[in-house]
Image (cartoon, grey):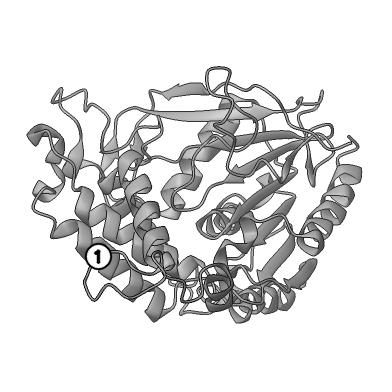
Amino acid sequence: MSGSVGIVSAQRATFEEPLNFSCGKVLPRYELMYETYGTLNADKSNAILVCHALSGHHHVAGSYADDEKNIGWWDNMIGPGKPVDTNKFFVIGLNNLGGCHGSTGPSSIDPVTGKQYGSSFPMVTVEDWVHSQARLADLLGIHRFAAIIGGSLGGMQAMQWAITYPDRVRNVLAIATAPHLTTENIAFNDVARNAILTDPDFHNGDFYQHGVVPTRGLRLARMLGHITYLSDDAMAGKFGRGLRSGEYKYGYDIEFEVESYLRYQGDKFAAYFDANTYLLMTKALDYFDPAQHTEHNLARAFSNVQANYLVVSFSSDWRFSPDRSREIVKALLHNKRNVSYAEVTSQHGHDSFLMQDEQYFAVMRNYLERVAVEVQV
């Protein structure tokens, strides 16, 4: 029977070896927050790494003893008897460098200055994250992952793992992702960043020292982003043209239900997420392009990949459309890799990868059951 992993607790890993970033900067030391679920088997072959998307973090499944309502962001997917079955796999979730949920990021204290990093924190890339994650795997004694799973930006990390460390990944599950952002996606990210950068309370990223938060900019950025995560059908079905009061008020305050929803989401996000982290995460999305160094030939970029792949897309996801997933599949097939592909019919847009959907969950479960046989768990 499917169930929860129950009460969980976060762990902190400290790394004293300097980390060189793609941008040329160096962190002399850093910390990563992570959680684990399930039991690592004797030969440490049943480990699965879950890479998070833009606003994700290490709390992937279960809940905390002091706040049982704080449930992991992928709790419907991960747990005993669930598609990512913790009776079979040892699952790791972590908060990426540059994050704002415990891993070293812009809001962390710089040991050199004694102040928060703010604008001095290095610009991060997907490659940088993968290198830092590999060190966490080393710390845990895991040489090769049974699978690396991620949706959206998390899927990009999973793909980069198979490129950077081909002998350390058996399977990649790349969900609702793309080999690089489209021009339109980069444009959306730029508008969102400009909402933050032009907020008077941003102070060039050093707002911590001023005792303020660029709430207005972060709120607008989240509202814009949230629109792109949903499909038109999903928004129409949920809100339509519903009015809060049932009639027009002829003003600029909240009138439509969808306006109320977006402002609520913006306010909630701005209350807990760090503006600098949002900027870093969106730039990491923009920069990701494994074919950049192979004359934009994706097949060549994947030429050293050894992992088997499951690629999943969603019919209503216009931000990371099925066409983009098929580019990944085509490039892998060119290299004669084992690839399974599923396009799931869904009305939830890009957020579909977070939703509990019978077809989607069946695809994930069936694939991972084969992975379990591979590693003999």
Q: Residue furthest top?
A: 65
Residue pointed to by mark 1: 253
Image spot of residue 202 (x, y percent): 14, 49
Q: Is residue 347 above or below residue 7?
A: below
Numbered circles on residues, count: 1
Q: What residue lies at 82% left-to-right and 50% top-to-bottom?
A: 368
Secondary structure of residue under mark 1: loop
Q: Is residue 15 left or right of residue 306?
A: left
Q: Residues within 10 Å of mark 1 (few under 14, many from 20)?
A: few
Q: Is residue 287 visible?
A: no
Where, quadrant-wise, is the N terminus in this rendering? top right
Q: Relative to the observer, which residue lies in front, 146 or 324?
A: 324
Where, quadrant-wise, is the C terminus in this rendering? top right
Q: What residue lies at 48% left-to-right and 43% top-to-bottom?
A: 131
Image spot of residue 105 (x, y percent): 32, 37
Q: Relative to the observer, which residue lies in front, 52 or 284?
A: 52
Q: Is residue 208 left or right of residue 92?
A: left
Q: What residue lies at 83% left-to-right and 52% top-to-bottom?
A: 365
